[in-house]
Image (spheres, rainbow, N blue to C red):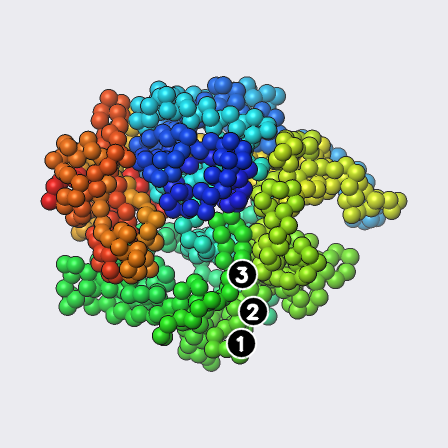
Amino acid sequence: MTNFWKDMWNSDCVLAIGGNPAENHPVSMYWINGARQKNGAKLLVVDPRINRTAAVADVYAPLRAGTDIVFLGGLINYTIQNRLYNEEYVKYFTNALTLINPDFQGPADLDGLFSGYDAEKRSYDAKTWQYQTEKQTVTVKEKDPATGVEQNVEKEVTVVKQAESLDDPNSAFARLKEHYARYTPEVVEKICGTPKEKFLQVAETFCATGAPDKSGSIMYAMGQTQHTVGTQNVRIMAMLQLLLGNIGVPGGGVNALRGESNVQGSTDMALLYHDLPGYLGCPTDKQPDLKTFTGKFDTTSYWVNGPRFVTTLLKAWYGSAATKDNEYAYSYLPKTSGNYSWMPLFEAMYASKIKGLFCMGQNPAVSGPNARLERKALANLDWLVVMDLFETETASFWKAPGVDPADIQTEVFMLPAADAMEKAGSIVTSGRRINWRPQVATAPGQAKPDIWIIDRLFKAVKAAYAGSTATKDRPILDLVWGYESTKDEPDVELIAREINGYALEDVKDASGAVLVAKGKLIPGFATIASAANPDAIACGCWIHSGYWADADDGSGVMRPAVKRRGQKDPGGLGIYPYWGFQWPANRKILYNRCSARPDGTPWSERKKLIWWDPNADSGTKDAQGAPVLGKWVGYDVPDFPATKAPTAKADPAKTGLAAQSGTDPFIMKADGKGWLFAPKGLLEGPLPEHYEPLESPVKNPMSGVQNNPVIKVFNTDADQDIGDRVGTSDEFPIVCTTFRLTEHWQTGTMSRTLPWLAELQPEMFLEISTELAQEKGIECGDQVVVSSARGQIQMVALVTGRWKPLNINGQVVHQVGMPWHFGWQGLATGAVANDLTPHVGDGNTMIPEYKAFLVDVKKA
């Protein structure tokens, strides 16, 4: 999330697409309504269904599930054709003027594919997607190794070529323009089913935020990500916002609506298989040594510090056992050899390649795609440990409807856990703000906090290996585990100290001066970046560094930053810099260098965030000892070197961050630019292109390529046994999606056990349009059978006007939806929606395609 919740208050227009804030994120709706009252902001909702956010929107535009790229591509085309983009922002802050390889070809040339596709491997060679480069001879000052005398030396360097204007046919901007010229309002209507006049209403209103004194925010949730093109859905939103100059500004951004209070924190701390804490990536079997692993980091962006962040993480984990001689115990880390995301894991369980599963705060028996298959996979385990508040459907999969417990050989253990309110610790909100939450209640019965359980499990494992001299056991025996307290559980504040980072020895700068004394907390990750001896630091998550260190609460009182509750709001933008800690570096709005023009002056006086003050003392002195003037100042922590003048030009003679110019705000990118065209990083192409969901009622009207060409479609015995074939429109003509309810929480484990919530939403239902209900002879309250290629389930029909039939290229397409909160446990029970969803996922992340699949509906 580039911005934060209250920042919605600063928006002139909010576009909700793939999310439903009024029902699922009501606090965000409070600030959206505040913007409407304060700024006259408009709320636009694009969604397959008239949800409660849409019901109060200024404009609601329907679309067919799985066609977001067409709609957003149409907005990009509208922006370019009507010259509504912020041209100054685009030229200076994005890679719009960067020249692309002239051999690049796109879907307009190759009928839906990009150049470099290998059909047999189902993958791309991205060679033709790269920037054009050229050699330049530059003069640099270097010391003569023999005499030590500094002298001028000519050096040949490689630089990225830039176009003279946006009209250059090989510029990234021209490639973007050409690609999305195909996405006309008429094409949007034909593919999405959005009436042309509705699309134009959205386009006219949102694209007006490209004016320098305006800003617009895009808010999204799982409605964007849970598709076979989910990553590209998110990317195209970022591209639109870059064109409009809405990234890095108050009231702007691309803002993810997290469904849990600590989803952000869990990903920060490497919940996902492919990451180490702080998004450092996970070693693979192709990176056998530390040098190879850290060699993946850019050397011309802030990732030049990536090796230091890895080293400090290894020191936090392995302490004195992590030495320079043994590459800081890099060999201790497991190396991945494939994809270990959700679906491949369950496929492996089904094939009995995995013998045991520790399931902590997850309920795959309800939440997993093709949940019947996943419950079958659980039955092939030797053992299953479920750590949760209640007996979930996963813990009780062996007594699911239609299952004979005698057929299940899996041994199941239940570990009762404490609720979030029953333990102390830090949480990270959607807006990256970290707050300390105290314990406010005592866990019932034998329920214990997570850290109590994990602490005892690890100590038992370590005891089992005690005395071993085998090299393979060193990762367990050498792991630092010093969180003891006087209470019956580990000291959570010691864990916070490790995450923040502390000095193992005196941390020094290049001159030998002590930056942080031994044993003290480091103030932030800048210390890691600047230390002459970074291996004197242990830091469990570099982006959280500084959150536990003492900081001013705005009144001069020092306390851990995460515990601050200061009420000051300089600038009146809702920044509140003294309340909690927002990673990174307590920065509220990411890429905030973009909030000022290239010359450093604010785009808008009413939305000024940071700006260049040529008279401010930079804190440094020149060769004569005089103060050097010029510094970025304002209400937020600059996401940019604070003393780098805005007029500075890129210096090809330098490397790393020093080579980036004063108008290269995206310091985590190798070229310092926001990418309208992505030469690397995404598997299915440098520009998002429309492909149909795996199951679709129509042939792709955009090209001859029906589905995302790089997705993995499973075809194992598991899928054949359960019936996970692709649903066709002949058998299953209706588009189905899943959604959340305000009254229930995730898989319902917590909410369906509460009588007052169970009473409000007592049973599973299918929401169906009046038109489809009439066609099927269904009345509201009837029992209906919903079937897909994976099987069938039964539920009650809720007939409403919130769904409308769509005209898709002359074909009538019906859509239905159902909540995914229900299962057989608790007070409010019902069929599992995900028994019908396919085992297929996004081409990059493998997130399942829950939001668009095919079904049929019949009266029971």
The residue at the point 49 percent across, 19 percent down is 82
Specify the amino acid type for callout 2: Leu
Q: Residue furthest bottom?
A: 467
- Mark 1 residue type: Ser
Q: Position of residue 809 (x, y in %)?
A: 27, 23
The structure residue drawn at horizontal position 27% and vertical position 56%, both measured from the top left corner, is 758
Q: Is residue 320 visible?
A: yes
* Mark 2 neighbour density, 10 Å: few (under 14) some (14–19) many (20 or more): some
Residue 690 visible in the displayed image? no
Left or right, residue 756 beside residue 517: left
Q: Residues within 10 Å of mark 1 (few under 14, many from 20)?
A: few
Instruction: Choose top left, top right, bottom left or bottom right for residue 381.
Output: bottom left
| Residue 31, above or below 159 | below
For mark 2, give the secondary structure.
helix
User: Residue 485: which numbered mark, if any?
Assistant: 1
Q: Which residue is mark 2?
A: 494
* Disc marking residue 834: none
- Which badge, 1 or 3, is on the more N-terminal residue? 3
The disc, 2 or 1, on the residue closer to the chain's N-terminal end is 1
Query: To which residue does mark 3 refer?
Result: 436
